[in-house]
Image: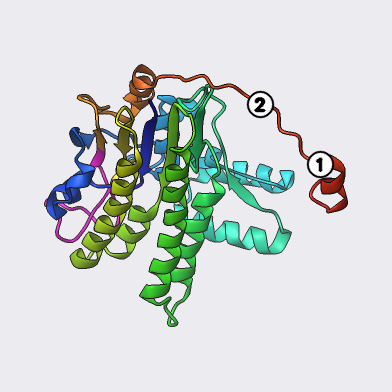
Amino acid sequence: MTLVVLGLDALDAALVDDFGHDVYRLSTHGKMESVAYMFDDRPHTGEVWPTVATGLHPSEHGITGGGESSWSNPVVELASRLIDPLNLKMGTRNKLGDVVENVTGASWELATVSDPTFFDGPNRVVHNWPGVHRNEELHRVWDVIEDGIRSGENNMPREVYERKIKGIAAEEFGWIREMLNHDLSLVASHIHVLDAFGHAYYDDRENLCAVYEWCQAHVQEILDEMDDDDEMLILSDHGMETTWTDGQNDPGTHSWRSFSASTLDTRPKDVHDVKSWVEAHVEDVTTEQSELDLPEEQLRQLGYIE
């Protein structure tokens, strides 16, 4: 059995009901409790996904505030730690970060947890999980969003934005489908497509509904390729406030309507409980390992290795 864990960023429980997309509604589904720490009024992507993976509060796993990223230059990193207590708004911090990159050449990356996660163990694989693995994939999406904002009067065409964001998401959905061809006990990936379009289409119900439908089609493709004994868990870190959502507060920001669904008769109902839920339902598999004999000298001559 393979357990597929889909982290669909910003999949909103109320919007799933509003749009009537049934694929997200697996055997059991509904709203899930999230967590906020850096911003006490709303969940934040960078700190929720590590909580999902570890079961720990952001204050425990440390991927929050100044601990959410690090700089390649130690002097710049020290300055960042000194600035953090000033509690600058995220937009201001990002602008300062851009200046630092341009002036010093230093680069920054999202930090990763040192605590145990449900990805640990043989034949468990993960791709692009904020705070855990391949954070550069999230950087790619954020870069597209930032380019769209910085376009100013020369706004990025909607078609270009959609092509870039969907292209990144399609790579991640495709990775999951390929992993189903291998003997694995757990396959997990975080996909940022609904968040990227939620921020763009929070006042455009027709287009946001179309994105949910596009994403749903990829989820269905994965379900179609799963074996009869495979299972799926869908999770989100938060939802998205829209202009038509009941009780909305500040459209375009993160909502508290996180979502979970599973093909089993139970599901995690709080982000802190996901790790224990996964551990209770994943079935580790053992596979025979064979040695790989690559032509080292040839690869060295070709420049692949030093």
Q: Is residue 164 above or below residue 151?
A: above
Task: Identify the residue under disc 1.
Answer: 295
Question: Residue 8 falls in which quadrant of the image?
Answer: top left
Start-end of magenta stretch: 239-259
Q: Main secondary structure of the magenta part?
A: loop
Quadrant where the N terminus is found in the figure: top left
Q: Position of residue 24 (x, y in %)?
A: 23, 44
The answer to whether residue 39 is left or right of residue 105 is: left
Residue flagged by tag 2: what amino acid is it?
Answer: Ser
Q: Secondary structure at mark 1?
A: loop
The residue positioned 40% from the left and 27% from the top of the image is 57
The residue positioned 41% from the left and 40% from the top of the image is 38
Q: Could you tell me if residue 262 is visible in this image?
A: yes
The one nearer the camera, 152 or 235, is 235
Q: Position of residue 109 (x, y in %)?
A: 60, 47
Q: Residues within 10 Å of mark 1 (few under 14, many from 20)?
A: few
